[in-house]
Image: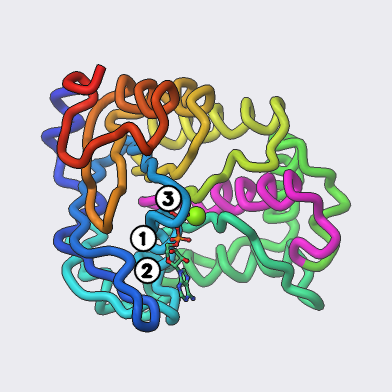
Amino acid sequence: MNQAKTAAAPLLSVRGLRVDVGDKRVLRSVDLDVGPGELVVLMGANGSGKSTLALALAGHPRYEVAGLAKLGAEDLLAMPVEARARAGLFLSFQAPPDIPGVKNNLFIRSALNAQRASRGEPETDAFDFLGQAKAGAKRLGLPEAMLARPVNEGFSGGERKRNELLQLALFKPRVALLDEIDSGLDVDGVRALVELVGGMRREGTAFVVVSHYLHLIEMLEPDRVLRLHEGCIAETGGIELARSIAAQGFAAAKTGQSAAARA
Ligand SMILES: Nc1ncnc2c1ncn2[C@@H]1O[C@H](COP(=O)(O)OP(=O)(O)O)[C@@H](O)[C@H]1O
Ligand SMILES: [Mg+2]
């Protein structure tokens, strides 16, 4: 959209990414570039491999991955999962799991301190951290009591998503992959999400957002909309592609045919 932005070197660059799960080839060859402050929306029918792409980039051990993925100048696929997080990659899960016995604020602070240590920064003071976490929770509408509970244990769907957003806000990653972050969020949660993402884009974070909801996609003002189909990015467009998918469905979409040609 913006000349200066598209000219910047991508923060996330993916070429010919192939991902197998067991015997199944889920992704055949995915190409993707996201520059600083850019937001790319990834759409695709259920089971098309959107979560697989996000999880494979984050380093989930279930996936067998080939091809190229770079975070800035670094070879993402060569890094163990924790190094990817330390280098500034963040994934919010479609279904955030419980971590029984691990207190939420300690979990978030440990993760934050591990990232700070890798950048040569000192640990956050426990008192300062709690202040930031409480302020973040308030801004995102997450009850403060949830900071002292085990991670996601007994959290509602929307509270889990707000807790993912709290981590996003505190970690300030270079690249954020948000997998159906809007599912379970109420209108206030969606508004808080849009505000947070907008602010972080202005600071230079690159986003890949998986979503099925045109209303959210419109609010996010994406730079590009991609459609994943049969293991590849079958279509790339602007907001009009999301509108056309919302109006016509995935079944009507034809591989390689532009949204304009379909309209
Ligand atoms: N552990 C697994 N074993 C076998 N198949 C899997 C596994 N995980 C995911 N898949 C398959 O990979 C495909 C892509 O899944 P997924 O990435 O979750 O899709 P999406 O997020 O686009 O809905 C689906 O067909 C799914 O059934
Ligand atoms: Mg998914």
Residue 53 has which mark? Answer: 1
Residue 176 has which mark? Answer: 3
Question: CB atoms at circles 1 and 2 under 8 Å apart?
Answer: yes
Residue 104 picture location, percent across and down: 75, 64
Q: Secondary structure at mark 2?
A: helix
* Depicted 248 relative to depicted 49: above or below: above
Query: What's the distance in space between the residues labelled 3 and 2, CA to CA?
Result: 14 Å
Q: Secondary structure at mark 3?
A: strand
Dividing the picture into quadrants, the one containing residue 120 is bottom left
- Judged left or right of residue 9, residue 24 is right
Whether residue 111 appears in this view of the structure is: yes
Q: Secondary structure at mark 1?
A: helix
- Residue drawn at x 58%, y 34% is 193
Question: Label 2, on which residue?
Answer: 56
Give the foreground label among 1 and 3. 1
User: What's the residue type where badge 2 is placed?
Assistant: Ala
Q: Residues within 10 Å of mark 1 (few under 14, many from 20)?
A: many
Closer-to-camera residue (31/102): 31
- Residue drawn at x 30%, y 26% is 241
Residue 223 picture location, percent across and down: 29, 29
Give the foreground label among 3 and 2. 2
Q: Which residues are magenta?
A: 151-175
Instruction: Mark 1 and ligand 1: say if the CB distance to the nearest ligand atom is below 8 Å.
Output: yes
